[in-house]
Amino acid sequence: MLFRSTRSSKKPTRNTIGRNSLALIAGCFLVAGFVAIFVLFFEGGSPLVEITTRGNYLGQTGIFSYRVGDKVSGIRRFTLTAEQDGKVHPLHQEEFARAAWRNPAGPLELAGEISFDLNKAGFQDGELKLIAEASDFSWRGWFKGNTNRQVVSMLVDTVPPQLQLLHGQRYILPGGSGIAIYRLSDPESEHGVRLNGRFHPGHLVGDGRDDVYIAYFALPYDHRQVEELKAIATDPAGNSTSVAFTSVVKKANYKQDTIAIGDTFLEAKIPEFVGYYPEMTGDNLEKYLYVNQTLRIENNNRISQLCADSAPERLWRDSFQRMPGSSRAGFADHRTYSYNGKIIDQQTHLGVDIASTRQAAVRAANSGKVVHADYLGIYGNMVLVDHGQGVFSLYSHLSQMDVKPGEMVDQQTVLGLTGTSGMAGGDHLHFSMLINGEFVTPLEWWDQHWLEVNIDEPLIDSRL
């Protein structure tokens, strides 16, 4: 018996396949559309919000910077407010309309600086909160967008530090040193003396008093008058106070000297500098002028940098000792250089040259810490000693250095031997004194009477 299957043998038609394919494609497009809409309009990244303050304090004027960013949909709204004890003060607000239906719909970044008067705003000394909040053009959050905020707690301090001047230098020379002694109420303040635009930091006097400070300062050798002289203190909130005082500038006479430069000197000296500074070009005279001008400035800038970080305590005592020998050149001598009878340069000698026997022992002028012992251009082999509170001594043209940075020295310590390294024509010691990187005459620091009258006695009197 034969049986016939009851299953249909009918095959899908091309129309049926086409309809199914179109439905599948339409579904894919619909899903892709939903995905695209979600990605475009429902992105989930929160905006970047940053507040940058100058420390944790706000003074009479509150100053801070802000930066807001959103890399996808852009920034819709940004607000800055200050809050204290429930009182809110709007500081800044920016709001943007949608600029396009595709991303970005608003600015990608905002940045600026805000300042406001805390007293006028009604804020009192104490804690205050700075609140920055930003939202973007995303449709998340029921079309409110992604939101981010930063809250920074600050301390309002509108009272300037109290400063009482106990002593101010009465007389000073161009190229001379001076001091101010003062009592200060806020130890966190930046304080010192400002002289003709240059700031000289103060330090605790070191005699057990925790509110009395001393600041050493220097009048540059080429300044003939004091245009600004005051003790000043600025607390972390930016509040400042100052007390001006006067100092009579005494007359200073500097020697004029002429130095003839010959080929023999150039042939002997220039190879030394080329070994350390191969970038020099030109003939020997051009290289000499580069050293005496450009390199001199660079060397003095480096010395100033080395003097920027001095020990806070006084490391020296009594007068600074002078190496035995004859003086060959003085502080602030004005030098004119000639070559073949023609003037080629003019410079100022910022130290005292002392000649003794060849390769004589050079001892530290006073107790301190070695901060530099290396070759430095026109100074050759040079040792720099920090005596604390901004006072430094410098020893150059050495043929040999016997100390290293970090070593503590006293007046018995041999730093090295005299020589002719650097811009030296004969064996000698070039000795300099510096106050916070400013070259000053060593004559005052070699003079015990000057130190007693100008430093020791005022310190004693400030205790009365």
Image: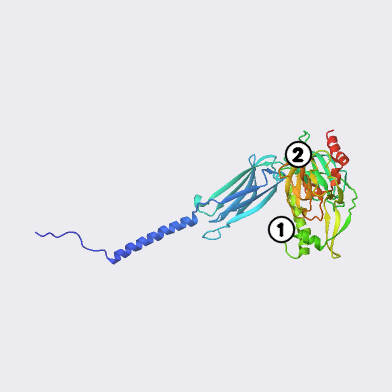
- Which residue matches tag 1? 275
**Is disc 2 placed on a helix, strand or loop?**
loop
> Mark 1 belongs to which amino acid?
Gly
Q: Residue furthest bottom?
A: 14
- Where residue 299 appears, x then y in whole percent? 75, 54
In this view, the residue in front, 462 or 99, is 462
Up the image or down, 210 lies above or below 399; here it is above
Point out the tag, 1 or 2, that comes first from the N-terminus: 1
In this view, the residue in front, 252 or 329, is 329
**Is disc 1 placed on a helix, strand or loop?**
helix
Check disc 1: other Cα within 10 Å, few if <14, some if 14-19, many if 20+.
Answer: few
Does the rendering let one see residue 309?
no
Does the rendering let one see residue 150?
yes
Quarter location, residue 6: bottom left
- Which residue matches tag 2? 313
Write the residue at 62% across / 44% down: 152
In this view, the residue in front, 355 or 46, is 355
How far apart are the two marked residues, 1 and 2, measured between alpha carbons?
A: 39 Å
Q: Is residue 149 left or right of residue 397?
A: left
> Mark 2 belongs to which amino acid?
Glu
Question: Can you say which quadrant of the picture contains the N terminus?
Answer: bottom left
Question: Can you say which quadrant of the picture contains the C terminus?
Answer: top right
